[in-house]
Amino acid sequence: MSNAPAIVIAEEPIRRAPVAFVELVRTHRRVTVGVLLVALLFLIALLSPVISPHDPLATDPDNSYLRPLSPGHLLGSDELGRDLLSRVLWGARVSLPVAFVAVAVGLVGGGLIGLTSGYAGGLVDLLLMRLMDALLAFPGLILAIAIVAALGPGLRNAMIAIGIVAVPVYARLVRAVVLQLKEMEFVVATRSLGANPARLIVAHFIPNLLNPIIVQVSLSAGFAMLAEATLSFLGLGAQLPTPDWGQMISSGASFLTNDPWLAIVPGAAISITVYSFNLLGDSLRDALDPRLRS
Amino acid sequence: MTAHLLELEDVQTQIALRRGAIRAVDHVSLTLDPGETLGIVGESGSGKSMTALSIMRLLPRAARITGGRIRFKGRDLADLSEDEMEAIRGTEMAMIFQDPMTSLNPVYRAGWQVGEPLRIHRHVDKRASIAAAVDLFRKVGIPDAKTRVDQFPHQFSGGMRQRTMIAMGLSTGPSLLIADEPTTALDVTIQAQILDLLRALNRDYGTATILITHNLGVVAGMCDRVLVMYAGRVVEQGTTEDVFVHPEHPYTWSLLRSIPRLDATGHEPLRPIEGSPPDMGRLPAGCKFHPRCPFVIDRCREEEPDLREVRSQLARCWVTQAGRSLDSPDGR
């Protein structure tokens, strides 16, 4: 019965269109800018020990409250004479990892919950989603503050708290997409080819989830960055003397009238970072949509 | 009873709804021999697709096979574990679906998808599977195969996508292909091309085919035998020629009569089947077709007939089983 179509491997090798990320980055200008900005931020975080002109913790009472563009202190210095540029550069080493760990916590936790909920349906779905609703009922920051208050202040707990706040967002997003995918005929079609449910989810669902997730990651990286700054501002995140942007704004706030740059410089750092991630996510969403790819 | 490729015996499939279970497939029996083409005809909701999904064991969650036997190559499919079933799907039996727009995964290139069964079952690597896809694309008549394998489904027309689905189904050389309304979503010229393709594949590779359709013309051109379903039951079964030349069930008779003819003289009115398909949750007593049947007799309202031999085919009708012929209805 198997006088079936024989599988002949094509004689000459076929040229596969380069799917590479490089190609994507090269052809979409907004993605290029986004990638460059984010890469630059990572580079800064990585190289801050090398490139910062001063020790971010070294105080110099003789040179306190220097204005930006002062000789030797490009962005000025703070009330203790610490170099602001160095502190901002070192601050990237705190803010970026915190944001990423928090987003990862939210993505993995929420992703698993969303996949389970959407795929299983029924009672499992009902219970998980009511739990997510309960989490969503609190404003994000209040919930994060409550969790940090319960766990104790510190960067590690701040990451966990921000991650937990992001969980329901990812859970709902993933569940919604899975519900939509489940209705598509390619699910039965793929199963009819002998794919088991695990393969269906891993090889066929997850790639379909990537686009919305990428956008959401950029948005929540921005949120996580802000939340971390807020927690640190409130003294619940990074502890003194760690150079942290939120914490710098917090201490700079007292000098807002006479020396506003103490708060403006770290504030600008946060803005630029959040903007970079949003630009990257937004442009990737447009570029990755297979319907828009030519 | 020598080895049929596929044998369904009294298969029953129920769908659990809030208001109770409905019998989507009700005691369906059929056989299919290697290389044969069987048509399953019926209106929407008559249980055609549920029968196919029962064979593949890919029923939606609310549906369950509650009785009967499905034997494929001598093995009772109910005895197989899910793993064993997965090993059969995509190798020995394959299915193509009605809507080629959604039956391909939008994020993957066509070649990758066509190679999926080979990667699952034959463990070939990505490169080789795509090379095989080029070859399969040529077999199903997709021009410019080498460029096409690198494209995404949305860059394909409906007919191309259906060809892609067929290529996917054929990649491992199954002995059974179930085509669930493969041409319904396509326009007429493309329909003809897809049917030609299915016919050629059936002829060249001897793949037994179950063709599910509501289009009688498709059956006439493609199938050796035909099974007519109504309300989850088989109401008539026989060779295509017998069933088309002298239908022995009023439903088949009405279906055939409702087709407008090109060679009709003058203004012949369209003759639809009166009434509407039955509500599966509240089927009438007796013969399920009797409220719409132009030949109805008293017995039809009380007792449901069995599927019995009438002339050279099987029919589930008191009238024809009693020896009357369906020429023109009386009582009208």
Image (cartoon, coloured by chain):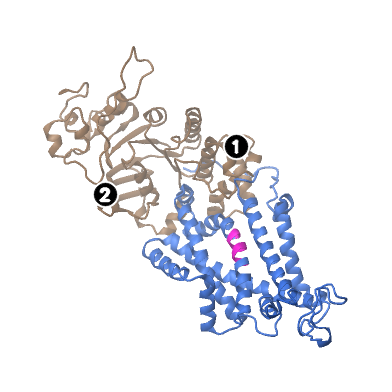
Seen at 71% across and 68% down, the residue is A268
Q: Which quadrant of the figure has residue B81?
A: bottom left
Distance (Cα) linking label 1 and label 2:
44 Å
Tell me the kind of residue under disc 1.
Arg
Tell me which chain appears brown: B
**Disc 2 sits on a residue from what chain?**
B
In the figure, B46 relative to A191: above or below?
above
Q: Please tell me whether mark 1 sits on a helix, a strand or a loop.
A: helix
The segment highlighted magenta reads A214-221
Is residue B88 located in the magenta-colored stretch of the structure? no
The residue that mark 2 highlights is B22
Dot 1 or dot 2: first in sequence order is 2
Q: Is residue A3 visible?
A: no
- Residue A88 is situated, as x and y percent measured from the top left of the image, at 74, 74
Mark 2 neighbour density, 10 Å: few (under 14) some (14–19) many (20 or more):
some
Q: Nearer the viewer, residue B102 or A164?
A: A164
- Residue B9 is situated, as x and y percent measured from the top left of the image, at 29, 46
The residue that mark 1 highlights is B138
Single out the residue that lies furthest toward the front.
A257
Q: Chain A hue?
A: blue
The reply to whether callout 1 and callout 2 are in contact (CB within 8 Å) is no
In the figure, A199 relative to B45: above or below?
below
Q: Is residue B227 left or right of residue A287?
A: left
